Image (spheres, rainbow, N blue to C red):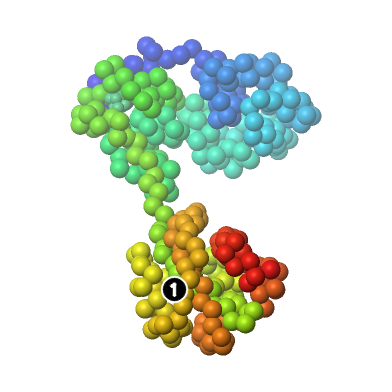
């Protein structure tokens, strides 16, 4: 027997007896799938039974006031799913005279029906040979083929749906789809898959290589970028040099201090020699280190040193700077990072900043 046949035999012997499995009614299958996207089988079952009792067909749902649908849905969360279900029921009742669209391409156009639900209805109810790929199926496939691509990426979505389609038993797509979902739910579980009783074991690459725990692979996030920055607070006779950050990038249009930047940590002397090269101050100029701080942004970590440089005369820094009166500073839009600096500065030089 091949993999697909083994899978079907296993399914016939081990499947759970669930009410939506004993029907080919697309309406029933649809409602069960919408509920199961929100919750697990055990919690979803009573909801399904209540929906079937209250709205046994698409007309009864289409004619019901929205409040009644939402009341029955209560506890499942994400109410837009219930609203979309109601609006598609109305469309099927009114535009299609209650006849359920019967192909994947028609189904996927309905509000709230995505590729997964469309494939489930098309295959379970109409035996269209389209593969379903939910989280359970993706886990089985990722281990069976030892896939190095994460399912959640665009490339992963494409790869998994192509492989699922290739793996599909085209003559029994309804049973095959249910079987592979059930295998993921009962045997090829997220942790400790029960490979010893798995019908796919002999050809499963993850099992053969004993690497089950390494699949499915997760999306690897890029580590945050580290940036090392030296801020210089140039102060002269009650005025401070600031420039306005340009459009785009972080903190656009906020006022900021002139700064230097490095990809590596630098000492105070390293920063000062760079500042001398720019002719920002003379080598003998007194410079005070006021604060060192790590500032965490979503994709970058800034390691910042703040230096105070007081001069008698205003110096041309050629940084696009404006010299603003110190008493105006609190009215300007500045990055939060500079707030910490000014707080520290107030402790050390209360007379400098009001
Ligand atoms: S052999 Fe193990 S890892 Fe492979 S599909 Fe079966 S349960 Fe999953």
Point out the image quarter for the N terminus: top left
Q: Is residue 299 left or right of residue 31?
A: left
Q: Residue at x 62, y 16 (%)?
A: 46
Is the residue 330 above or below the residue 25 in the image? below
Q: Position of residue 341 (x, y in %)?
A: 56, 63
Q: Is residue 301 left or right of residue 4?
A: right
For label 1, the SS is strand
Foreground pick, 292 / 212: 292
Mark 1 is surrounded, within 10 Å at the Cα level, by few (under 14), some (14 to 19) or many (20 or more) other residues, namely some
Q: Is residue 196 left or right of residue 348?
A: left
Is the residue 344 above or below the residue 323 in the image? above
Q: Quadrant of residue 177?
A: top left
Answer yes or no: is residue 224 visible: yes
- Circle 1 is placed at which residue position? 260
Q: Position of residue 21 (x, y in %)?
A: 51, 18
Q: Residue at x 53, y 88 (%)?
A: 316
Is the residue 260 above or below the residue 154 in the image? below
Q: Position of residue 142 (x, y in %)?
A: 33, 35
Foreground pick, 278 / 196: 278
- Quadrant location of ligand 1? top left
Is the residue 229 above or below the residue 92 in the image? below
Foreground pick, 314 / 208: 314
Q: Residue at x 25, y 23 (%)?
A: 201
Q: Position of residue 307 (x, y in %)?
A: 49, 70
Point out the image quarter for the C terminus: bottom right
Q: Residue at x 36, y 73 (%)?
A: 269
């Amino acid at each position: 027997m091949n993999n697909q046949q083994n899978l079907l035999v296993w399914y016939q012997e081990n499947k759970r007896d669930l009410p939506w499995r004993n029907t080919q009614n697309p309406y029933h299958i649809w409602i069960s799938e919408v509920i199961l996207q929100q919750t697990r089988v055990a919690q979803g079952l009573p909801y399904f039974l209540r929906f079937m009792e209250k709205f046994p067909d698409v007309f009864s749902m289409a004619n019901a006031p929205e409040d009644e649908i939402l009341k029955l849905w209560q506890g499942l969360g994400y109410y837009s799913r219930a609203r979309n279900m109601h609006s598609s029921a109305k469309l099927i009742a009114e535009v299609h005279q209650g006849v359920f669209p019967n192909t994947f391409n028609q189904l996927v156009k309905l509000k709230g029906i995505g590729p997964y639900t469309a494939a489930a209805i098309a295959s379970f109810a109409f035996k269209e040979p389209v593969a379903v790929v939910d989280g359970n199926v993706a886990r089985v496939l990722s281990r069976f083929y030892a896939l190095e691509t994460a399912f959640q990426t665009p490339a992963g979505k494409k790869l998994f749906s192509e492989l699922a389609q290739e793996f599909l038993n085209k003559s029994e797509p309804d049973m095959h789809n249910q079987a592979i979902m059930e295998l993921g739910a009962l045997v090829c579980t997220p942790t400790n898959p029960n490979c010893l009783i798995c019908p796919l074991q002999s050809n499963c690459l993850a099992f053969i290589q004993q690497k089950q725990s390494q699949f499915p692979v997760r999306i690897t996030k890029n580590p945050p970028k580290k940036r090392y920055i030296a801020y210089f607070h140039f102060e002269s006779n009650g005025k401070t040099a600031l420039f306005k950050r340009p459009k785009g990038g972080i903190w656009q249009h906020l006022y900021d201090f002139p700064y230097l930047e490095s990809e590596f940590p630098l000492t105070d002397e390293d920063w000062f020699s760079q500042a001398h090269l720019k002719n920002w101050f003379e080598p003998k100029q007194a410079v005070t280190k006021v604060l060192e701080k790590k500032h965490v942004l979503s994709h970058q970590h800034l390691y910042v040193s703040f230096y105070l440089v007081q001069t008698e005369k205003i110096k041309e820094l050629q940084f696009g700077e404006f010299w603003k009166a110190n008493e105006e500073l609190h009215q300007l839009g500045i990055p939060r990072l500079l707030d910490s600096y000014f707080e520290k500065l107030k402790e050390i030089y209360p007379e400098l900043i009001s």
